[in-house]
Image: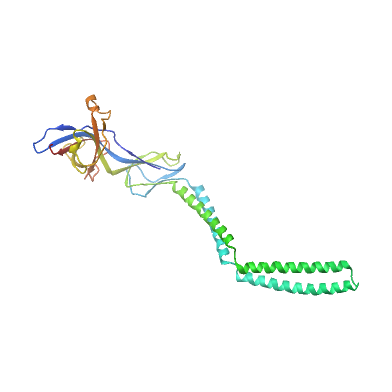
Amino acid sequence: MTIRHLLGLGVGVLSACTASTSGHVLTASGTIEATEADLAFQAPGKITEILVREGDRVQPGQTLSRVDHTELEARRAATMAQVAVARAVLAELRAGARSEEVSQARLAVGAADQRLAEQARETARTVKLADGGAVSQEVRERAETALALAQAERSRLVEQLTLLLGGSRAERITAQQAQVAQAEALVAQLDALLAQQTIVAPFAGIITQRLREPGEVVSGGMPVLRLLDPTDRWVRVYVRQDEVGRLSLGQRASLLTDAFPGQPFEGVIATISAQAEFTPRNVQTREERIKLVHAVRIRILGDTALVLKPGLAADVTFATPLR
C-alpha cells in the first residue's frame, strides 16, 4: 500500500516591505517540503529480501522488496493444473467422438444384431417345441427372456452410437466452459495475491528510510521503505487577505536559505488557496494569528543538483506591482 504525505511543517506569513516606486516587495518565510510515500505490503508476511538501501535512486515499477510467497506459488501451480484438465475436457467435448470410437460402436451394434437374430431363431424353435410338448414351459420362458435381453442390449448400443454421432450436448459444453472460467479466475486471484507480496516503486525517487529488515514479519500496511520524490518540492507560506490579490498562479519568486547564503533559487507559485483561514498556531504573535490568510505554495525550479533538502528554512520574496 502506498501512503503519500508531506514533509515539513514550517509556515510563514507575508509582510509588506517598501520598495522602489516601480513595484512592491512581499516577503515570507517557510520550510521546504516534498512529496514522500511510505511503501508497504498489502498482505502480511515474512520479508525475504530488501533490494535497496537508504540513498538509492529508484525508477517507477522497480522491485524494492519481497515477502515469502512459497505457499502461494504452490497453490498457483496446483490451480494451473486444474485449468489444464478443465480445458482438455472442454476441447474433447467440442471435438465430439473420435472416428475410432464411432467405428467400435458400429461394430458393437453389428454384433448385437447377429446375437439378436440367433436368439430370435433359437426362441422360435423353443416355442415350437414347447407347443408340441417336447420341452417344458420353463425352457420356453428362459428362451423368451433371453430374446428380450438381446433386444434391450441392441437398443442400448444403438442409442450409444446415436449419441456419439450427434456429439456432446450444448448443456455439457456450457457447464464445462464454466469450469474452465472458474479455474482461470482462481489463477487470477492468486496472481493478485502474489503481486501483493512485492513492493514496487510508484514513482522515481530516492529511498530516504529503510524501516524494516529481511527476516522480519510484517502486517499488511506496515511501512517498510520511505520514498521521496525530489522533483516535487515546494515552500508553503501564508498571505494576508489584503495582499493575496497581488499574487497570481505562475508568478515567479526568489528563495534564499541559510544553508546557501547569498545564493538565490527560483520558484513559481503553483497554488493559491481559494478559501481564507486563520493563521496557523505556530506563528508566534497573537496579532498575526488572528489575521485571515491564504495558503500559497511555491514550487522550486531549476535546482537540478537537489541541494534544497526538505526541512530547510527558506525566505521567499515576491516582486508585485503597486496598487
The foreground one among 72 and 117 is 117
Residue 217 spot, x, y in % from top left: 46, 39
Residue 73 spot, x, y in % from top left: 50, 50
Q: Quadrant of residue 107?
A: bottom right
Outermost residue on the front side: it is 131
Image-based side of 65 in relation to 34, left or right: right
Outermost residue on the top side: it is 286
Taking the spot 79% from the left edge, 73% from the top edge, the residue there is 120
The foreground one among 122 and 83 is 122
Image-based side of 95 in relation to 261, left or right: right
Taking the spot 77% from the left edge, 67% from the top edge, the residue there is 148
Taking the spot 60% from the left edge, 69% from the top edge, the residue there is 98
Q: How many marks?
A: 0
Taking the spot 31% from the left edge, 41% from the top edge, the residue there is 35
Compared to 283, does 98 lie above or below? below
Q: In the picture, which quadrant includes the N terminus?
A: top left
Outermost residue on the right side: it is 133
Colouring method of the image: rainbow
Residue 135 spot, x, y in % from top left: 89, 71
Image-based side of 155 in relation to 248, left or right: right
Residue 159 spot, x, y in % from top left: 67, 67
Compared to 132, does 76 lie above or below? above
Q: In the picture, which quadrant includes the C terminus?
A: top left
